[in-house]
Amino acid sequence: MSIVSRTNIRVAVDSDLPQIKELYAIWGQAFAYLLNDQTFVAEHNGQIVAAVRLAFEEATFVVRSLFVREDYRGRGIAKALLEAVEVELGMAEAYCLPLSGQEKLFAGMGFQLIAGLTAPDFLISRRESLRENNQDVVIMKRSLGVEVRPLAARDLGLAMDLIYEFELAEVKTLSENDMRSIYSKIISAGGAVFGAYRGSRIVGTCTLNVCANLSWSGRPYGIVENIIVTKGERNKGIGKCLLLFARRMAKSKNCYKVALMTKQKDSKTTSFYRSAGFSDDKIGYQKRFSAQQ
């Protein structure tokens, strides 16, 4: 039986922190357990022997800090960790800054070398800082044809076309001034409207509202609405990408929870929401008012 088959690949929990810090200390790196990171670990015989971080920085997914203890290298553990990250990402776009020589490993989950100027500025700065510290890193990007990012105000009309495409009761069409006013309120409260772009075309959208709150030490909570994927692009993982971004954005805003509601109760819908990290362990109640105005 191989080492990998006897190794537990999982998402780290708070109690793993001392072992993770010890692992990265072997590498000579400090481990910062940042609010919006998700750390995947490989555990063998009760010991954490490898780890990798999936960070969400400036609305961008970044795979960081892949490290395998020397006596466990060459046994497929790094690949297994990246496969777990790949499942979490779904179709979401992501970047990484691997050490030179690790390109083939990351290419296995769809990353490709890119020219530095096409990467986000914060990653270019990070690469230069690492190189100044004698770490020969490159920038790679994973893109599966759809990019999810916060919607610019100029694209509001395209997102509204998707919302109107959805089979809703008859509602009033918003004027451009109304759209921009509502959009500004969402953004100023800390929320976001996301678009899933295929080239210049928007094929999906969702909205994260961040709500002020008096409990949980004043931490806000997030509500996801308007999860819509255009008909010809459904069942391709785009909805999961939108939810993944909304979930990460809510966490980056220090929300104590993010929630959504659906009237669908079939197993396919339940599996979809669970795949994006949402659970159905609470009961929701609502009172709907007329859509007519």
Image (tube, rainbow, N blue to C red):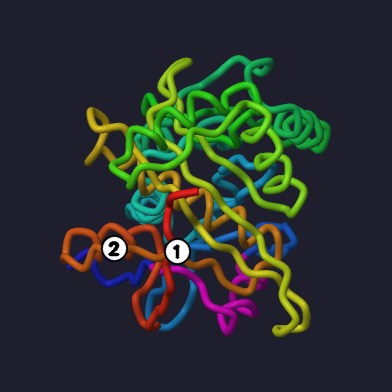
The magenta segment: 10-23
Q: Secondary structure at mark 2?
A: helix
Query: Which mark is drawn over residue 270?
Result: none
Identify residue for label 2.
Answer: 4
- Residue 147 is one of the magenta-drawn residues: no
Q: x%, y% of residue 289?
A: 45, 64
Give the residue drawn at x 40%, y 32%: 162
Is 133 placed above or below 188 here? above
Q: How much space separates mark 1 and mark 2, taking CA atoms?
A: 54 Å
Q: Position of residue 186 (x, y in %)?
A: 67, 48
What's the residue type where badge 1 is placed? Phe
In the picture, residue 29 is in which quadrant?
bottom right
Q: Give above or below for 292 relative to 40.
A: above
Depth order, front residue of 61/206:
206
Vertically, is 107 above or below 168? above
Please indicate, yes or no, whether residue 4 appears anywhere in the rendered image.
yes
Q: Assign the N terminus to one quadrant of the image.
A: bottom left
Q: Tell whether 25 sits left or right of 198.
A: right
On the question of residue 103 being in view, the answer is no
Amino acid type at image mark 2: Val
Looking at the image, which residue is at 59% across and 48% down? 64
In the shown orientation, is residue 1 left or right of residue 272?
A: left
Name the element at disc 1. Answer: loop
Density class for disc 2 (Cα within 10 Å; few <14, some 14-19, many ≥20) is some
Q: Is residue 230 above or below residue 213?
A: above
Mark linked to residue 289: 1
| Front position in the image: 76 or 254 | 254
Q: What x and y, as percent, mark residue 254? A: 70, 66
Label 1 Cα crowd, 10 Å radius (few <14 / some 14-19 / many 20+): few
